[in-house]
Amino acid sequence: MTLKSTPRWMKTALEGAAKTTVAMPWQRGAHRAEMLARRKGSVAQAPAKRPSVAAC
């Protein structure tokens, strides 16, 4: 039986693990700040409520 070579996905995973600059999902950064700014901006631009039927 011959020894198989390391699969391509394994090589990529090992290279990624060796990097110290890999961004983890729980890290807060510019991307998260941008998302929060968009969310706060959309709250200010919320559409006005429709008038009630009784007011017509």
Image (cartoon, rainbow, N blue to C red):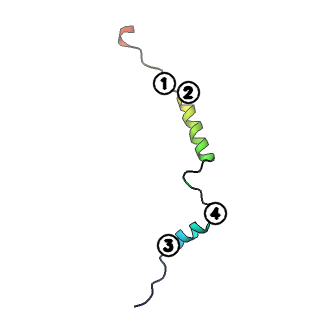
User: Mark 4 and mark 2: span between their CA atoms?
Assistant: 39 Å
The residue indicated by pointer 3 is: 10
- Residue most extreme to the left: 53
Mark 4 vs mark 2: which is more N-terminal? 4
What SS does tag 1 mark?
loop
In percent of the image, x 39 and y 91: which residue is there? 1
User: Mark 2 and mark 3: span between their CA atoms?
Assistant: 47 Å
Mark 4 vs mark 3: which is more N-terminal? 3
Whether residues under marks 1 and 2 lie with C-beta atoms below 8 angstroms apart, the answer is: no
The quarter of the picture where residue 50 lies is: top left
| Residue 34 drawn at (x, y percent) | 60, 42
Q: Can residue 35 be seen by looking at this rendering? A: yes
Mark 2 vs mark 3: which is more N-terminal? 3
Q: Amino acid at mark 4?
A: Thr
- Residue most extreme to the top: 55
Crowding at mark 2 (Cα within 10 Å: few <14, some 14-19, many 20+): few
User: Mark 1 and mark 2: span between their CA atoms?
Assistant: 9 Å
The residue indicated by pointer 1 is: 47
Nearer the camera: disc 1 or disc 4: 4
| Residue 44 drawn at (x, y percent) | 55, 27
The residue indicated by pointer 4 is: 20
Q: Is residue 24 above or below residue 43?
A: below
Q: Amino acid at mark 1?
A: Pro
What SS does tag 2 mark?
helix
Nearer the camera: disc 2 or disc 3: 3
Nearer the camera: disc 4 or disc 3: 4
